[in-house]
Image (cartoon, rainbow, N blue to C red):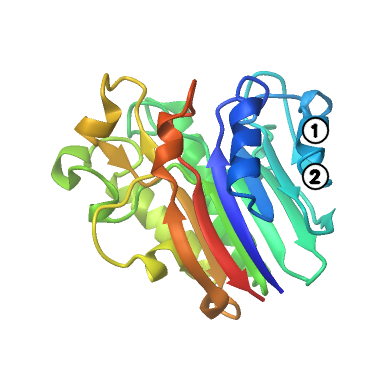
Amino acid sequence: MAFTLATWNINSVRLRADIVAKLMGEQAPDVLCLQECKSPVDKIPRDQFTALGYTHMVARGQKGYNGVAIFSKIPMVEAGAEDFAQLGHARHIAGRLENGVTIHNHYVPAGGDVADREVNEKFGQKLDYLTDMRDAFHASKPEKSILVGDLNIAPREDDVWDHKKLLKVVSHTPIEVEHFNDVMASGGWADVTRNDIPDGKLYSWWSYRAKDWDAADKGRRLDHIWATGDIQNAAHSSRVMRAARGWDRPSDHAPVFATFDV
């Protein structure tokens, strides 16, 4: 079975329901994973998405913050949710498709503004979340699985607009990249996007603060699609839909796509 998956930090699914519907209508991914939904589950505008063929949903939500959801045209059942770092946040949901593939949708904490856990509690929470992810994958090696989401780390030098300038900026610091790579290694994950697009600058996030984000192009690749080793070779056709960053009342993130023949 071939299916196309997209992941997108939507920055409020209720505020931006129309551009979610636009993506569903124009791009029609079989599975759409959203982060930062900022909505209780019962307030997600599910009927609008069901009308477009997304008849299956698994989600975790909370009012005004965080929140993750997976919408699917393919039959899907919930496959668990974890509270990594015991934050009490809605940051993870998993769904299992009828072909047995499990999709993990994560919204990793952003980590605040200062890359020092001694003075910034949020940075410590981010590192602890990643450590718990690593330990969970060490304990139970995932198989036939995909991990997506806003992981809030741009790991490679060409995942940011200026490597040297961002080395001390949260999302690209060496300690975050080390934690990111540890998580990937612990589960035997492969970076699907970079397997398909191995070279060159690649971003999925551009700050709202930039007056002309497109021309300035000071982006970071914070949104990721991974696959376990047993299905990584089934992935192809990766892309970042940069144009969506320029839609009406956009998220500051762009959707990331990949197709799997599993």
Residue, disc 2: 57
* Quadrant of the frame with the N terminus: bottom right
Element type at marker 1? helix
* Rendering coords of residue 78 (x, y %): 83, 52
* Residue 222 seen from this side: yes
Outermost residue to the front: 26
Q: Is residue 35 above or below residue 17?
A: below
How far apart marks 2 and 1 lie (CA) works out to 8 Å
Element type at marker 2? strand
* Rendering coords of residue 96 (x, y %): 78, 61
Choose the circle earlier in sequence order: 2 or 1: 1
Residue, disc 1: 46
Decide: few, some or many residues near mark 1? Use Cα within 10 Å; few <14, some 14-19, many ≥20: some
For the point 27% across and 19% down, the residue is 211
Q: Quadrant of residue 19?
A: top right
* Residue 253 seen from this side: no
* Rendering coords of residue 190 (x, y %): 48, 70
* Rendering coords of residue 145 (x, y %): 65, 67
User: Which one is in front, 111 or 246?
Assistant: 246
For the point 71% across and 24% down, the residue is 39
Decide: few, some or many residues near mark 2? Use Cα within 10 Å; few <14, some 14-19, many ≥20: many
Kind of residue at disc 2: Met
User: Which one is in front, 245 or 111?
Assistant: 245
For the point 36% across and 22% down, the residue is 208
For the point 67% across and 45% down, the residue is 92
| Left or right: 30 in relation to 210 | right
Kind of residue at disc 1: Arg
Q: Nearer the viewer, mark 2 or mark 1?
A: 1
